[in-house]
Amino acid sequence: MAKVLTVENGVQAREEIDKLITQGYDKEHIYLFAHSDDREKDIADALDVETAGMSDTGFFKGMKNLVAKRGDELRSEFEGVGLSQQEADEYEKVLDEGRLVLVAQDSTDK
């Protein structure tokens, strides 16, 4: 089961990521989401965590995301890392508010 956290900024994300790691989550199974693709990549790179991509969403959904609106892409990526459609809708709205979402998967989730 995935653990989902919402934070306001990169500093809070760093604190929560450190907590997740001490709880036994692997950095390779912690995903960061932001509404802006550039912000998401920049913060994930700085914090050395993953962003969801084609390998998480599947090839065909990944190709569809290349032409989809960002909200559709984010919901698809959330589902790709194990969230339900309802959860994906809920957390996409959180991203609309400018916050960040972290999704940590237990090694048995993938």
Image (spheres, rainbow, N blue to C red):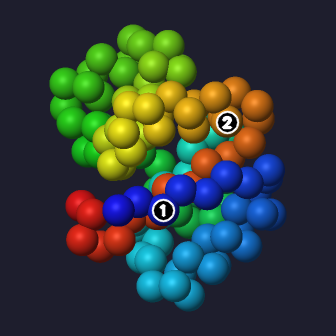
Sooner in the amino-acid sequence: mark 2 or mark 1: 1
Read off the residue under disc 2: 94
Residue at image point 35% right, 62% down: 1
Q: Is residue 36 at least partly visible in the picture?
A: no
Quadrant including the C terminus: bottom left
Read off the residue under disc 1: 3
**Callout 2 secondary element:** helix
Q: Report the side of 89 relative to 46 (left or right).
A: left
**In the depicted view, which residue is nearer to us: 51 or 109?**
109
Name the quadrant containing residue 99.
top right
x, y percent for residue 62: 29, 28
x, y percent for residue 17: 61, 71
**In the depicted view, which residue is nearer to us: 106 or 40?**
106
Residue at image point 76% right, 35% down: 98
| Kind of residue sitting beneath label 1 | Lys
Q: Report the side of 34 relative to 98 (left or right).
A: left
Name the quadrant containing residue 72.
top left
| Kind of residue sitting beneath label 2 | Val
